[in-house]
């Protein structure tokens, strides 16, 4: 989903939507300077790449949100049709984020420094 806007910063309603659809829909914010060919601002386009009903990749289709007012509940309803039913599974990382041995040794070092 792409939001083309005259504003330089992301609007609050857009931040709420990104949180609501986290890991179920991708979002992008495009300020007017980055898209001079888009004449009607603000505009919302959904680039559909997944048929969520059949869980299959489809050809890229661009669908415009036609309403002028960007009301949160109406946007949620519109975007729900394009969102995944469940959150995307996290990618397993090869490197652990937490090393218990390293944490223990650094904690001992802090104790010595304060002693």
Image (cartoon, rainbow, N blue to C red):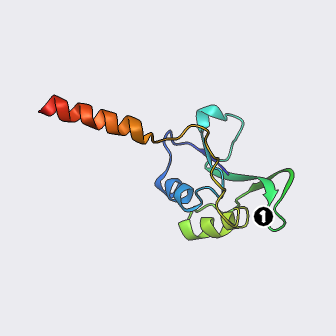
* Image: 10 above or below 76: above
Q: Is 43 drawn above or below residue 97 in the view shown?
A: below
Q: Which residue is mark 1?
A: 52
Up-down relation of residue 6 to residue 77 (above or below) = above
> Where residue 52 appears, x then y in whole percent?
78, 64
Q: What residue is rendered at 70% in x and 67% in y?
A: 85
**Crowd rating for badge 1 (residues with CA inside 10 Å; few <14, some 14–19, many 20+):** some
How many callouts does the rendering have? 1
Point 72% across, 36% down: residue? 37
Quadrant of residue 35 within the rendered picture? top right
Residue 94 left/right relative to 64:
left
In this view, 58 is above or below 72: above
Observer-nearest of 59 and 109: 109
Residue that extends furthest to the left in the rendered view of this protein: 115
Q: Look at 51% across and 42% down and name the residue there.
A: 7
Q: Where residue 20 appears, x then y in whole percent?
A: 55, 62
**x 80%, y 56%: residue:** 50
> What secondary structure is found at the residue carrying circle 1?
loop
Could you tell whether 76 is left or right of 113 in the image?
right
Image quadrant where residue 70 sits: bottom right
> Which quadrant, please, contains the C terminus?
top left
Tell me where residue 10 appears, x and y as whole percent. 50, 46
Left or right of 53 on screen, residue 113: left
């Amino acid at each position: 989903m792409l939001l083309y806007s005259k504003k330089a910063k992301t609007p609050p309603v857009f931040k709420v939507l990104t949180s609501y659809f986290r890991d179920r829909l991708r979002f992008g914010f495009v300020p007017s300077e980055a898209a001079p060919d888009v004449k009607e601002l603000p505009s919302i386009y959904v680039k559909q790449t997944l048929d969520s009903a059949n869980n299959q990749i489809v050809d890229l289709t661009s669908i415009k949100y036609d309403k002028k007012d960007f009301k949160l509940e109406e946007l949620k309803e519109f975007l729900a049709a394009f969102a995944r039913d469940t959150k995307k599974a996290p990618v397993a990382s090869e490197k652990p984020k937490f090393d218990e041995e390293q944490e223990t040794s650094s904690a001992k070092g802090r104790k010595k420094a304060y002693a």
